[in-house]
Amino acid sequence: MRKALAIAWKDLLVLSRDFISFILLLAMPLLLILVLGTAFGGMFVSNAAPFQITLAFVDQDNGEMARLLRDEVLQGPDLKEMIRLRTFASPDEARQAVRAGSAAAALIVPSGFSQAVLGENESKLEVLASPDSTIKAGVIRSIAEAFTTEVMARGAMVRLTLAELLSRNLIQPQEAAAAAARWVPELQSLQSQIRIQREQEVAPGAQLPGAMAYYSISMGVMYVLFAANTAGGSILTERRTRTLLRLFSAPLERRTVLVGKLLGVFLLALIQFLLVVAFTALAYRVSWGSSIPGLALMILATVFCLAGLGALLASLYRSESQAAAIGPAVALLLTFLAGGMWVFTGGPQWLDILSHASPVRWSIDGFLTLMSGGGLAQILLPIGVLLGLGAVFFGIGFLRIRKNYDVA
């Protein structure tokens, strides 16, 4: 093992002498984190100020369902701190408030909405969005759609129940309307159904990470893959310059040489990410969480997985030009798929499922959980997935490289 470590250390020294590669691998992620974190800071929940939406509300229905929406949902305990409700007498006044920028969106309950819910007619809430507050308006639209779907489903359930009771003469026809109005809200608390869904579960009292923290993770992880690809591609350079053949002719087992090479890939990626974590914590004031064991294991699991991917890619390349072209493209694709360029909010479920095919997504999820106040117990799944993928990547990469170089 000592000989393998010596080979890995030699590779690190050789790579460190390449000044341009050093700048690209160390300075570029820090610069991108600063630029993206500053540019998109307004699109993230800030640690300094809570995410708030000023909503213009118009009640043209004056029925039970409108009251339920206003009092139990929009001003219920789950959303009251986030939504600042302003009531208006007419839709025109609400539209003017949205145009003037004093409200991010307007929500209009049309006349007859409650009756439609209790009957069989479909009725929809109207949402007016400000083009300057698309994210906040999207939140209101999601709440309105969820509320309408929920109460329509309840209305259908109540109608079936009433029909059965009427058929058995257990209730009088004149009592049906009053029973329906009373039963729809009481079937189940709407507060458990209508709420903002977040990708990450946040520990009590914790704050969601901001843009600088998010891009510290995503750009840091992406450049770890760049570093792993650079280190893996160095094997091709040594084959071209015949340095690898000289190592094979030395009094060393060829397996030891290859283990040293792959260990060098891991160490370069580890140093890369540790520098990103340290610099962002000191210069950008990014908090990586309070769980030191959790952070250490997430770093090691992430680096192990992506270094293994770098080794696997190195075993597939046939030339240095392929390494220079394919490696960065794979890193960008996996980061984009994971939502590392921007957060996939409000997207379809299949996109969220697909993003988990990228190891970058598992890494982002784990680090975000730590930043949000989670501990080691909450990140065991991402750690397990990353370690498992890393073992597969390193295993296949080692076998392919051994076959390519006919290592006994």
Image (cartoon, rainbow, N blue to C red):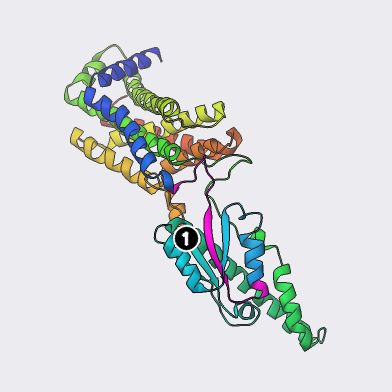
176 relative to 312 in the view: left or right: right
Task: Inspect this view and state whether residue 234 appears.
Answer: yes
Instruction: Tell which of 65 and 322 is nearer to you.
Output: 65
Mark 1 neighbour class, 10 Å CA radius: few under 14, some 14 to 19, many 20 or more: many
Q: Which residues are magenta?
A: 43-65
Amino acid under disc 1: Ala
Residue name at image x 35 percent, y 24 percent: 268
389 versus 246 height, above or below: below
Give the percent coordinates (x, y) of residue 385.
49, 39
Give the percent coordinates (x, y) of residue 77.
66, 54
Task: Inspect this view and state whether residue 127 appears.
Answer: no
Residue name at image x 35 percent, y 19 percent: 256
Residue name at image x 65 percent, y 77 percent: 156
Indicate yes or no whether the magenta region holds residue 303: no
241 versus 42 height, above or below: above
Pointer 1 residue: 137
